[in-house]
């Protein structure tokens, strides 16, 4: 529907799309996404950034997180990796939501 998507400025024929450089992978100026989907991305990122750190606190306190000598177990290591990846994905999704809103 008209007016529901944010669109990048169009360049004129014969000129490169962004500041004289050839088109490259990573350029998001041609991305069109409805505002509602941009908001969904931002809400998803916020939810993940809120939930995962709290979960990490509970995992760290779990008796399975450390062995008898106090060293981290595989249980803790696996969960820390999962939480770390999830937080990185949350940052990427949030950045994408912010870029498409701009």
Image (spheres, helix red, strand yellow):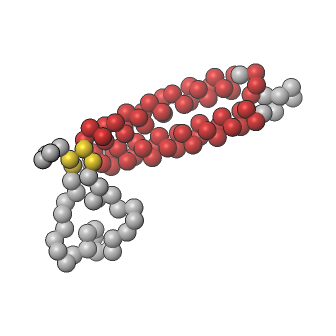
For this orientation, the residue located farthest to the left is 2
State the image coordinates of residue 18 (x, y, percent, origin top left). Answer: 28, 68
Count of numbered marks: 0
* Residue at figure coordinates x 32%, y 74% from the top left: 21
For this orientation, the residue located farthest to the bottom is 14
State the image coordinates of residue 64 (x, y, percent, origin top left). Answer: 76, 25
* Residue at figure coordinates x 68%, y 26% from the top left: 60
Is 38 left, or right, of 4 in this rendering? right
Is 92 left, or right, of 70 in this rendering? left
Is 8 left, or right, of 91 in this rendering? left
* Residue at figure coordinates x 87%, y 29% from the top left: 69
Q: In this view, does 22 lie above or below 48?
A: below
Q: In which quarter of the image is residue 56?
A: top right
Q: Is residue 75 above or below residue 81?
A: above
Quadrant where the N terminus is found in the figure: top left
Q: In this view, does 49 lie above or below 85?
A: above
State the image coordinates of residue 53 (x, y, percent, origin top left). Answer: 56, 30
For this orientation, the residue located farthest to the front is 1
* Residue at figure coordinates x 33%, y 49% from the top left: 99
Q: Quadrant of residue 40?
A: top left
State the image coordinates of residue 9 (x, y, percent, origin top left). Answer: 19, 60
Q: In which quarter of the image is residue 78?
A: top right
């Amino acid at each position: 529907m008209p007016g529901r998507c944010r669109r990048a400025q169009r360049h004129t024929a014969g000129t490169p799309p962004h500041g004289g450089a050839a088109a490259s992978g990573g350029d998001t100026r041609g991305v069109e996404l409805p505002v509602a989907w941009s908001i969904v991305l931002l809400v998803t990122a916020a939810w993940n950034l809120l939930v995962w750190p709290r979960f990490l606190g509970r995992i760290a306190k779990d008796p399975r997180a450390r062995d008898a000598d106090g060293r981290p177990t595989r249980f803790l290591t696996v969960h820390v990796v999962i939480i770390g990846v999830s937080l990185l994905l949350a940052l990427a999704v949030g950045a994408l939501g912010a870029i498409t809103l701009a």
